[in-house]
Image (cartoon, helix red, strand yellow):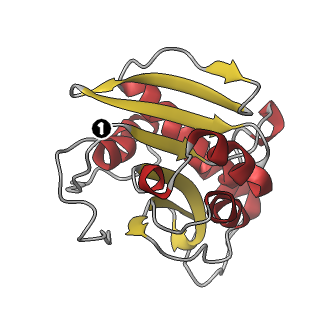
Amino acid sequence: MYSTPVDCLTQDTIVCRDIISASEGDKIFPKRVFDVQLSCMGYIIIGLGNPGSEYENTRHNMGARMLEAFRSKHDFPAWKNDKLKRAFVSKGEVASDTATLVFPQTFMNKSGLSAVAFIKSKKAAERTVVIYDDLDLPLGHVKISFGRSSGGHNGLESVIKGLKTKDFVRVRIGVSPTTASAKFGNQQESKRSLI
């Protein structure tokens, strides 16, 4: 149940597949083959979420959790708090390519304020990957797209407005506990399944 933007995902390997496989140890996703290719060269990978321990295990922090799993799997350095850019940042290499991991500390709906501090041009935006939760996808499902609308996600809308372009890669992580039609089961159970 994966979709990929054919034009922009035709280079080397690494980022998206490893973002998904890094979380498998946490049993967030069923074991699947994720055959997406994407170059990491000079990429900025942004995981959307809310700062603070009270939000750590909420659905809105799925993007940040996936980013942390990726950072850990690839032995990136510890997060550094860049107060000027309002984000936790970790820079490293994956398969000889560089990547900057960014977890905005501006709260979800103002993520664009942090993103614009890292991405200064439309060309740089095309080398950006934004990871975020999607309530319209069943838990564990992933969709990848390029250049689409925010789909009503306020954090993504903030990034689009900040960058003044929609032309970047998005990795949507399904967090709906039952179906994409928003028929929810027990709220307590859905919270436990994300932890």
* Horizontal relation, residue 74 to residue 38: left or right: right
* Horizontal relation, residue 3 to residue 104: left or right: left
Q: Residue, x 36% and y 37% (percent of image)?
A: 42
Where, by quadrant of the figure, is residue 19 drawn? top left
**Label 1 Cα crowd, 10 Å radius (few <14 / some 14-19 / many 20+):** some
Q: Nearer the viewer, residue 136 or 51?
A: 51
Check the image and report above or below for 97 versus 4. above
Residue 71, percent from left and from top: 45, 27
* Horizontal relation, residue 35 to residue 101: left or right: left
For the view shown, which residue lies furthest in the top direction? 77
Check the image and report above or below for 135 versus 77. below
SS at circle 1: loop
Where, by quadrant of the figure, is residue 97 drawn? top left
For the view shown, which residue lies furthest in the bottom direction? 181
Q: Residue, x 65% and y 81% (percent of image)?
A: 183
For the N terminus, the quadrant is bottom left
Residue 167, percent from left and from top: 46, 66
Q: Residue, x 29% and y 50% (percent of image)?
A: 31
Residue 6, percent from left and from top: 23, 71
Residue 14, percent from left and from top: 25, 41
Q: Nearer the viewer, residue 5 or 187?
A: 5
Give the residue type at disc 1: Met
Q: Residue, x 82% and y 37% (percent of image)?
A: 54
Q: Nearer the viewer, residue 108 or 190?
A: 108
Q: Which residue is mark 1?
A: 41
Check the image and report above or below for 96 versus 141. above
For the C terminus, the quadrant is top right
